[in-house]
Amino acid sequence: MQGPAFDIQKVDKEPPQIIPIQPDMEDPELRPMFGTAKEHFGKTPVIGVEVGSSTCANACEVVAAWPEITKLYCVDYYPTYSDFPVADVQRDALGYAIANIVDEPKIHLILEPSVEAAKRFESESLHFVYIDANHSYTFVCDDIKAWLPKIKKGGVIGGHDYDWEDKEHDGELAVKRAVDEMYGDRVHYHISLFYIENRKNRYEPYTGIRSDWWVFV
């Protein structure tokens, strides 16, 4: 990796409790792509990136459940949340992220747009990249193109919300379109159930179905 990761100090915020539940997975703490990648790499030490980490809650669960991860870089550009009509937990995502990772030495936070952050990494230096940032078609395409060269042969690229509907474009399955156009029948996907628990009245409980996608490089 080129250049230092950001050193983040703890802030006075209690992190939210965000619990993904996949009852049909062997590792209920892991989203489907991470469970697949963990099995794929076995006991091999791995380095990966999560693009669009928000509160870093998922990243913390991943490193806890997957001890072979030596470094997990979390990429997000938090200023974009300031004018975005989302729940308070998203507007305060950076504060939650800092509180979540302050005692987790394996997680390194990079505060840059995805494509710019990818330039920090050498070619074929990563074992996996998980994309969960802007779900619009153009952004997904750009993220895949930026990160794919950074993944080792035999690695995994994937992401969240394969079935996401872009309400601004007549419900287009934008993530699916971008991924399918690039990878076709090489794409794997898995439906999963997520539950977000209410914490200090910051947001309402939420249960919904989302799906991961992944491709072996």
Image (cartoon, rainbow, N blue to C red):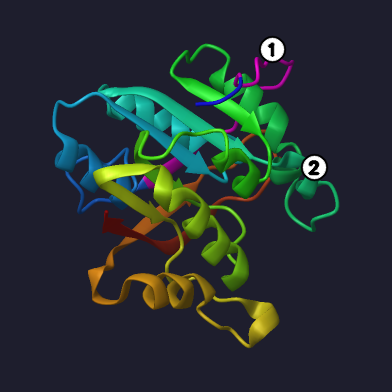
The residue drawn where x is 60% and y is 39% is: 117
Q: Is residue 212 left or right of residue 147?
A: left
Residue type pointed to by label 2: Pro
Residue type pointed to by label 1: Gln
Q: Residue 10 versus residue 182: which sits nearer the camera? A: 182
Asked if the magenta segment contains residue 7, the reply would be: yes
Q: Is residue 33 left or right of residue 82?
A: left
Q: Secondary structure at mark 1?
A: loop
Question: In the image, is residue 116 above or below residue 16?
Answer: below
Asked if residue 56 shows in the view, the reply is no
Count the marks.
Answer: 2
Q: Position of residue 85 (x, y in %)?
A: 79, 58
Q: Between disc 2 and disc 1, whose residue precedes?
A: 1
Q: Residue 198 versus residue 155: which sits nearer the camera? A: 155
Looking at the image, which residue sits at the far front? 123
Q: CA distance from mark 2 to mark 1?
A: 18 Å
- The quarter of the picture where the C terminus appears is bottom left
Q: Counting other residues with Cα less than 10 Å from the Cα at mark 1, is it few (<14), some (14-19), or many (20 or more)?
A: few
Q: Position of residue 173 (x, y in %)?
A: 50, 78
Looking at the image, which residue sits at the far right? 83
Q: Residue 2 versus residue 188: which sits nearer the camera? A: 2
Question: Which range of residues does the magenta coloring cover?
Answer: 4-20
The residue drawn where x is 41% and y is 39% is: 123
Question: In the image, is residue 182 above or below residue 10?
Answer: below
The residue that mark 1 highlights is 9
The residue drawn where x is 30% and y is 76% is: 184
The residue that mark 2 highlights is 79
Q: Secondary structure at mark 2?
A: helix
Q: Position of residue 38 (x, y in %)?
A: 22, 38
Asked if the magenta segment contains residue 11, the reply would be: yes
Q: Quadrant of residue 172?
A: bottom right
The residue drawn where x is 83% and y is 46% is: 82
